[in-house]
Amino acid sequence: MQRQPLTLIEHITRTQASFPDATGDFTQLMEAIALACKLIAREVNKAGVGKLLGLAGRRNVQGEQVARLDEFANDTLVHTLSRTGTACALGSEELAVPILLPTSDSEGKYAVLFDPLDGSSNIDLAMPVGTIFGVYRRCSQPGRLGEPSDLLQPARALIAAGYAVYGSSTVFVYTTGEGVHGFTLDPSIGEFLLSHPDIRVPARGSILSINIANRSRWDEATMRAVDRWLDQKRALTSRYVGSLVADAHRALLRGGLFAYPADASHPAGKLRLLYEAGPMALLFEKAGGAASDGRQSILDKMPEDLHDRTPLILGGTADHKLWSEALAEGEDER
Ligand code: AHG
Ligand code: MN
Ligand code: MN
């Protein structure tokens, strides 16, 4: 008889077996995130028919046009997470300020950050988009309303991180610190089934993923790093979807580099530290890869604001080293 792959919830339950005082709250929290991703996948996969294409007619705190699917994905995550009682604070790309939730002494142990729909500009083009999330243990006093400080923690403090990529298939990838594992949604049974056990980032890959249209706005060190990559005497190529989840997922599985450096239009970088770069950084590091802003590990960056931005370089260790060494050359000469 063909052995059925583990479901996501069975896998999460097994990770909790090593925590004797586990109450099941974390598993319930992850179930809520997985449910939200299934609901979002359903809408993403029929957006054209489901009247969820196009813009919602308002701008978010980032000043970006909000797509209807951004709103749907955000509302879905807020709803499924709030009703579990396991979270004290929720931070979202689509919400200017955090949602702080009332808790009891034994509940609301977690603070959750998410980019509900990443790659919004690709929605109407049927291109891959995704959802990114990170989970912290609360640091504020239990039994009270959550506090913004519960969300403003460095990515090294994340107890779980992951994403769902809504592409040719829907794949849910997560880590709780013990390896990185991928699950493919079988829509006929509505289950995420283990398809990528223990993902490891190849140290060296052949793909560079960067928005080359920003070239004229990069500083000299970034130009040097890109040229150093391109001057390698080996077969190279480039791919750029414009959805972080899609570009990062490819780099996680195939190696190579994803880079969104700072540029003259985004001096602090474009991507957001708490709900884009941080979760991706934990995944890459736990899969044996590397993640930095070019100079410092993303995991050690201390957020000051929910929507802080950062440059982001993700990749295999050898590819990442090539980039960061090229960047550092300029510093040595100063
Ligand atoms: P979001 O749709 O959540 O705002 O994220 C878009 C981000 C990220 O997904 C992607 O890597 C980057 O924007 C692409 O930016 P450019 O279009 O400037 O290359
Ligand atoms: Mn995003
Ligand atoms: Mn988004």
Image (spheres, helix red, strand yellow):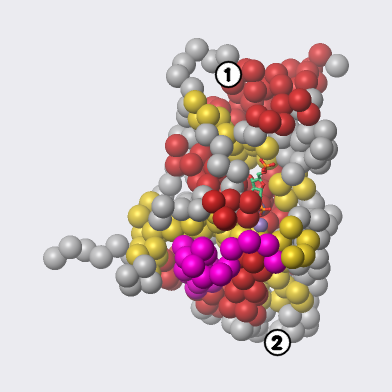
Q: Tell me, yes or no, whether the highlighted magenta stretch contains residue 4.
A: no
- Image quadrant of residue 210? top right
Identify the residue at horizontal 50%, vertical 53% (top origin).
126
Image height check: is 246 above or below 99? above
Could you tell me the amino acid type at mark 2?
A: Ser
Identify the residue at horizontal 76%, vertical 55% (top origin).
64
Tell me where residue 121 appears, x and y as whole percent. 63, 51
Residues packed near mark 2 inside 10 Å, few (<14), some (14 to 19) or many (20 plus):
some
The residue at which mark 1 appears reads as 230
Count of numbered labels shown in the rendering: 2
Tell me where residue 300 appears, x and y as whole percent. 72, 46
Rendering quadrant holding ligand 3: bottom right
In the picture, which quadrant includes the C terminus? top right
Helix or strand or loop: what does disc 1 sit on?
helix
Residues at marks 2 and 1, CA–CA distance in whole angstroms? 55 Å
Kindly tell me whether residue 91 is visible in this rendering: yes
The residue at which mark 2 appears reads as 104
Q: Depth check: 95 or 83 in front?
A: 95
Tell me where residue 118 appears, x and y as whole percent. 61, 55
Q: Depth check: 124 or 64 in front?
A: 124
Q: Earlier in the sequence, mark 2 or mark 1?
A: 2
The magenta region covers 35-56
- Image quadrant of residue 110? bottom right
Q: Tell me, yes or no, whether the highlighted magenta stretch contains residue 46.
A: yes
Tell me where residue 160 appears, x and y as whole percent. 58, 60
